[in-house]
Amino acid sequence: MKATVKWIDGMMMVAESPSGHAVVMDGPEDLGGRNLGIRPMEMLLLGMGGCSEIDVIHILKRGRHEVSSCEVELTAERAEKEPKVFTKIHAHFRVGGAELPEAAVERAVKMSAEKYCSASIMLGAMAEVTHSFEIV
């Protein structure tokens, strides 16, 4: 896998993924940024959320469950001193669908957390990563 991050000016960068998609990242104004894009650490957290959400949806659909909505809310804490790594991350899933069994949603979240979500498992090597869910 190969990705590129190109500096534009100030603290603004354009990141391009191996699949050819681009996103703007920027730093805070106090570091010379203009607040025109997502911060890199925010991107890391969002990547974990997207990775785990894809897993949950895929697992439920593979189990022939009708999923009409899925949202994951991420709450994170970072160390106070440098390096300001994530120390705690909580992912709360809100999953909607016709007659979704609670056991199926619980299983999908657990399988993502323990087996499939590379981002969550990787960040879990450094931070305490927890998960919860509700059916909406």
Image (cartoon, grey):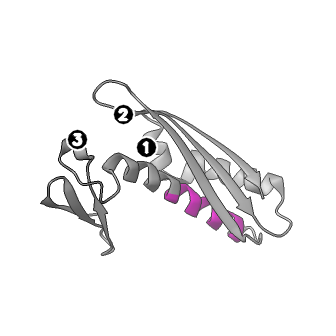
Q: Is residue 91 left or right of residue 60?
A: left
Pointer 1 or 2: first along the chain: 2
Residue that protrudes farthest toward the bottom in the picture: 20
Nearer to us: label 1 or label 2: 2
Specify the principal SS of the magenta part: helix
Which residue corresponds to the image point at 50% horizontal and 58% vertical from the top-left? 51
Pointer 2 or 3: first along the chain: 3
Front residue of 134 and 113 = 134
Which residue corresponds to the image point at 24% horizontal and 46% vertical from the top-left? 29
Q: CA distance from mark 2 to mark 3?
A: 20 Å
Q: CA distance from mark 3 to mark 1?
A: 30 Å
Which residue corresponds to the image point at 83% horizontal and 70% vertical from the top-left? 98
Residue 122 numbered tag = 1
The amino acid type, in three-letter code, at marker 1 is Met
User: What residue is disc 3 on?
Assistant: 30
Quadrant where the C terminus is found in the figure: bottom right
Whole-percent x, y for residue 4 in the image = 21, 63
Whole-percent x, y for residue 22 in the image = 30, 70
Q: Is residue 70 left or right of residue 15?
A: right
User: What residue is disc 2 on?
Assistant: 85
Q: CA distance from mark 1 to mark 2?
A: 13 Å
